[in-house]
Image: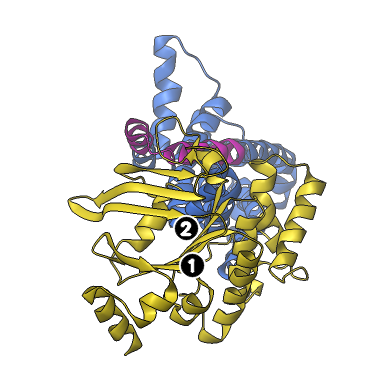
Chain colours: A blue, B yellow
Amino acid sequence: MDVFIDTFLNGEVLAQYAPSILQGALVTVLLSVLIVIFGVAFGAARACLRAYRVRALAALIMIFADVFRALPPLVLILLIFFGLPNVGVVLSAPIVLFLVLSLVLGAFAEEIVWAGITATPKGQWEAARSTGLSHTQALIWVVLPQAIRMVIPPLTNRAIAITKMTALGMVIGVPDILGQATTAQSFSANASPLTLAAIAYVILFLPFVMASRWLEARFARPML
Amino acid sequence: MPGPDAPALDIRGLHKSFGAEPVLKGIDLSLAKSEMVFVLGPSGSGKSTMLRCCNRLEEPDRGEIRVEGDPVTGPRVDLNLMRQRSGIVFQAFNLYPHLTAAANVMLALRHVQKKPRAEAQKLAHDALDRVGLGEKTHQYPAQLSGGQQQRVAIARALALRPRVMLFDEPTSALDPELVGEVLGVMRDVKGQGMTMLVVSHEMKFAREAADRVVFMDGGNIVEEGPPEQIFTRPDHPRTQAFLARVRG
């Protein structure tokens, strides 16, 4: 038992590295917020573009979504971080992480929002267009509000899944929670910083997971 | 022929196919101002398609449609301007579920006709009053009965001050006890001088309220005349057969 406590909950190590984990938590939060904002915005924007049903454009959007959903994010992160400098483009580790995860979340968000748009009954478009609203106005005022409502639960789940992947930043040296924790772990030769990291992730993400459960229940009810 | 003598709604030589399947084979139909015309016919006869061509929810293949002389068809028609001249009421109501009754009515007033908020609110309230729902302005569609929802849909179309109202089986999705309130509103709208083209199976109402009845079959207008004549002395065997069938 003592060995266990000494390995995972060593008081001295915990106290020593708590501040750096806290710093890492700030980085994780900042990155996560930016990724969710840009990812969802880009995804929703592309889903809207797709609603104009221009065949070439829709095909491009679909190819983009499929490729970014198929590729493991870690592959993209390594490819960009270690590859691009060879062609003269040097991006910092946090920027690479932000770019890759925004693009990946964007690809999923596009598919999710598009599913909501296609699930909105055709009669809604017809009613809107019959009163003189343009295609764009019908999309903005009638279809999109209903589509977003429908897809908030899957969108929230996907956003959580992708933002958790900020932990992948560790491999390219992003000083996020896990980055700080693994550094601390190697300096202290003790796993306690990783325990701290786990606690930090739970504290950060549990509210969102719980919120998504609440949202799912809320939006399962008929629309009011 | 624009001008005061132009028919309220004028359909000339309207053709429409879905793929290789011809649905409308040359429809000619003209409505005078304030006239209420009922369109009857078996399912698949093309009546809803004809109605939906009148504001180009379906795109006609051939033919010409005008509302009070202003073209509906043709390459230079401003679709969104044209559609404000002909309101349509759908079988499934198609109210916007995320908006209150008042907001449903206000949406096009605000964003198409660009009315200031206060004026749009007043117009929406007036329109809902006209259909007897002045008390329900803040209710969402899910909080209203089917009959009330369809009345909101009528108010939504009326609020834009259309010249013609198109009704596409407005009572077919309603429970029988809710049909009466919608027909009552339609009667009021007619009383206020609206020109109305109605696709419906409400024979009794057609007989009481319509100025003229049109019978369609196989993409053609087979017969038309005053309701009294069509319902009691139909000329065409297909009209006779249809009426015999629906009367059981």
Question: From the viewer's perspective, is residue B57 above or below residue A173?
Answer: below
The answer, for residue A87, to whether it is visible in the render is yes
What residue is rendered at 30% in x and 72% in y? B42
Q: How crowded is mark 2: few (under 14 residues within 10 Å), some or many (20 or more)?
A: some
Question: Label 2 sits on what residue type?
Answer: Gly
Residue at the location (58% across, 50% down)? Answer: B163
Q: Mark 1 lies on which chain?
A: B
Query: Was residue A53 drawn as part of the magenta stretch in this picture?
Result: yes
- The answer to which of B142 and B151 lies nearer the viewer is B151
How many labels were placed on the picture? 2
Q: Residue at x 37, y 31 (%)?
A: A57
Relative to B1, say whether B123 is above or below: below
Taking the view exactly as shown, the residue that stands out farthest to the left is B20
**Residue B46, image x, y percentages:** 31, 61
Report the front residue among B231 and B136: B231
Q: From where the camera sits, is residue A224 visible?
A: no
Quarter holding residue B181:
bottom right
Residue to which mark 1 is pinned: B92
At label 1, which amino acid type do we have?
Ala
- Give the quadrant of the N terminus of chain A: bottom right
Q: Is mark 1 on a helix, strand or loop?
A: loop
Q: Position of residue B26 (x, y in %)?
A: 27, 51
Say which mark, if any, is on residue A60. none
How would you classify the magenta stretch by its main secondary structure? helix
Q: Is mark 2 on a helix, strand or loop?
A: helix
Q: Are marks 1 and 2 in contact (CB under 8 Å)?
A: yes
User: What is the C-alpha distance between the residues marked 1 and 2?
Assistant: 8 Å
Instruction: Say which residue label 2 marks.
Output: A123
The quadrant holding residue A28 is: top right
Give the magenta part as a residue range: A35-62
Snapshot quadrant of residue A80: top left
Where does residue A135 sit, x and y in percent of width and height?
50, 41
